[in-house]
Image (cartoon, helix red, strand yellow):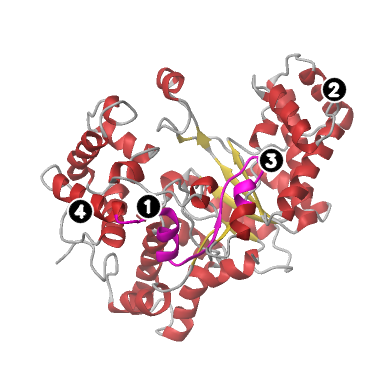
């Protein structure tokens, strides 16, 4: 039997029926990704598999380094063909690593290769077949439309001109909506060397002087409205932890003024500033009817030597172990008390926090929107079979899985839409087993509609793009 077959991951007849009848053909709303909108606008294409598969993919670089492959073949100056062969040689050592599933799914779906397992022995044959398909015109837009994608939300800094989003919105030849997402992390980084320059650039973008904290918020509001006018309906924050320190307006004014003039800001003061600004960000989102996303818990850039050489997002990040239940509760509660809590999706990176997030949601559901607060899908190190299963189980036990807005790619790769298939197969396998074990009704209308909702319809209703 082929490894990637019709019933891949589907271990019961009920699971197979759920997937093939209720999930497989559902469209994709990819509401969080890191695709480059310029590459979508230009309809980028690639000469070979390394360019589309290995460029910028820190998952694969980590695996190659672990397998004893030198940096020359990851981020170095070896040829594309040499890099691909080293990755192919690594693949047999990745059994039970999610890359083994992801890569073979991508080979099957986009290159019609389901009869070969990637290895050093098959590398050359796979290289040539994928090269022929890529040179035949497999471009970014074709990958998106062939994957049945209807909406993509990129991740964008408040300074971004959104020129590529604007051009795509006017392009009637391309049916996929490409919308921006507001990611203002740099504005929070008051204790970083780049912060003052960033605030200067923000002042230019907003056409507003920024010498006080109030003026900072006003400038951010100007850019927030600009994003809204260009289709943005989500914000996103990549947080080490949650910021909810107590503060006074006078403290924030003093901290901001000192930092703006080049003075030193302590860790405690930086947290107060971030706490104030996160509340203002929440208020902005609530006013516009946006959905807020909090990605919590990454420990980034651990390897100082290689970070200095290669920069961020190159494979040297890990799961942090900070506790943040109390500040998260405080943050959500402060916004809720003002009636300024927007629809919110909470993503945890440490799996131990699944139940923390799962129980936190229910504290602030207010009946205004089904699933107003969402437990985010398995993210980064958790977007694999075990991580997705544990997220589904926690949400099932502590919330309402039927209201879940489903999967996303969180990826820079145009081949990553198979993550949606992967998630849908795992979901159907869990529900199919429950049906056959008598844990939920053996009712395909009931359970099948739940699958279709989670696969697509819940996101369609929730975000309202």
Residue assigned mark 3: 158
The residues colored magenta run: 136-165
Crowding around mark 2 (Cα neighbors within 10 Å: few <14, some 14 to 19, many 20+) is some
**At 65% from the left edge and 67% from the top edge, which residue is drawn?**
464
Crowding around mark 1 (Cα neighbors within 10 Å: few <14, some 14 to 19, many 20+) is many
In space, the residues marked 1 and 3 are separated at their CA atoms by 31 Å
Relative placement, left or right, of 10 versus 335 is left
Q: Does label 1 or label 3 sit earlier along the sequence?
A: 3
**At 50% from the left edge and 32% from the top edge, which residue is drawn?**
299
Q: Nearer the viewer, mark 4 or mark 1?
A: 4
Q: Secondary structure at mark 3?
A: loop
Q: Check contact, mark 4 vs mark 2: CB within 8 A.
A: no
Q: Does label 2 or label 3 sit earlier along the sequence?
A: 3
Q: Does label 4 or label 1 sit earlier along the sequence?
A: 4
Residue assigned mark 4: 129
Q: Does label 4 or label 2 sit earlier along the sequence?
A: 4
Q: Position of residue 202 (x, y in %)?
A: 74, 33
Q: Where 441 falls versus 209 (above or below)?
A: below
Q: Nearer the viewer, mark 2 or mark 3?
A: 3
Residue assigned mark 1: 384
In space, the residues marked 3 and 4 are separated at their CA atoms by 41 Å
Q: Does label 1 or label 2 sit earlier along the sequence?
A: 2
Q: Position of residue 24 (x, y in %)?
A: 39, 72
Towards the viewer: 449 or 82: 82
Residue assigned mark 2: 254
Q: Secondary structure at mark 4?
A: helix
């Amino acid at each position: 039997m082929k490894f990637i077959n019709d019933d891949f991951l589907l271990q019961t007849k009920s699971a197979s029926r759920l997937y093939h009848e209720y999930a497989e053909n559902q469209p994709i709303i990819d509401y969080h990704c890191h695709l480059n909108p310029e590459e979508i606008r230009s309809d980028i294409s690639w000469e070979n598999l390394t360019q589309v598969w290995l460029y910028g993919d820190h998952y694969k670089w980590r695996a190659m380094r672990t397998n004893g492959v030198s940096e020359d073949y990851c981020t170095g100056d070896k040829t594309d063909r040499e890099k691909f062969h080293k990755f192919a040689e690594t693949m047999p050592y990745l059994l039970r690593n999610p890359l083994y599933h992801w890569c073979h799914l991508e080979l099957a779906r986009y290159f019609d290769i389901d009869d070969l397992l990637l290895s050093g022995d098959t590398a050359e044959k796979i290289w040539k077949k994928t090269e022929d398909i890529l040179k035949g015109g497999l471009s970014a837009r074709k990958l998106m439309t062939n994957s049945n994608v209807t909406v993509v939300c990129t991740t964008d800094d408040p300074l971004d001109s959104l020129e590529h989003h604007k051009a795509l919105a006017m392009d009637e030849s391309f049916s996929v909506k490409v919308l921006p997402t507001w990611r203002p992390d740099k504005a929070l980084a008051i204790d970083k060397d780049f912060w003052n320059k960033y605030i200067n650039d923000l002042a230019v973008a907003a056409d507003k002087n920024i010498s006080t904290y109030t003026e900072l918020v006003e400038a951010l509001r100007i850019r927030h409205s600009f994003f809204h006018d260009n289709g943005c309906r989500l914000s996103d924050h990549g947080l080490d932890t949650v910021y909810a320190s107590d503060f006074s307006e006078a403290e924030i004014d003093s901290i901001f003024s000192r930092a703006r003039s080049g003075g030193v800001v302590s860790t405690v003061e930086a947290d107060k500033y971030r706490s104030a600004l996160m509340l203002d960000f929440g208020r902005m989102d609530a006013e516009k009817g946006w959905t807020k996303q909090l990605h919590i818990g990454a420990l980034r850039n651990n390897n100082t030597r290689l970070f200095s050489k290669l920069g961020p997002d190159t494979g040297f990040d890990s799961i942090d172990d900070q506790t943040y239940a109390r500040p998260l509760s405080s943050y959500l509660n402060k916004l809720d008390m003002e009636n300024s809590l927007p629809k919110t999706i909470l993503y945890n990176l440490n799996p131990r926090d699944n139940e923390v997030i799962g129980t936190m949601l229910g504290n602030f559901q207010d009946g205004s929107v089904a699933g107003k607060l969402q437990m985010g899908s398995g993210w980064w190190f958790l977007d694999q079979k075990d991580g997705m299963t544990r997220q589904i189980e926690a949400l099932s036990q502590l919330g309402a899985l039927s209201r879940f807005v489903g999967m996303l790619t969180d990826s820079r790769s145009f081949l990553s839409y198979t993550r949606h298939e992967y998630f849908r197969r795992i979901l159907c396998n869990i529900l199919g087993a429950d049906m056959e074990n008598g844990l939920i009704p053996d009712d395909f209308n009931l359970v099948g509609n739940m699958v279709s909702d989670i696969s697509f319809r819940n996101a369609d209703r929730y975000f309202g793009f």
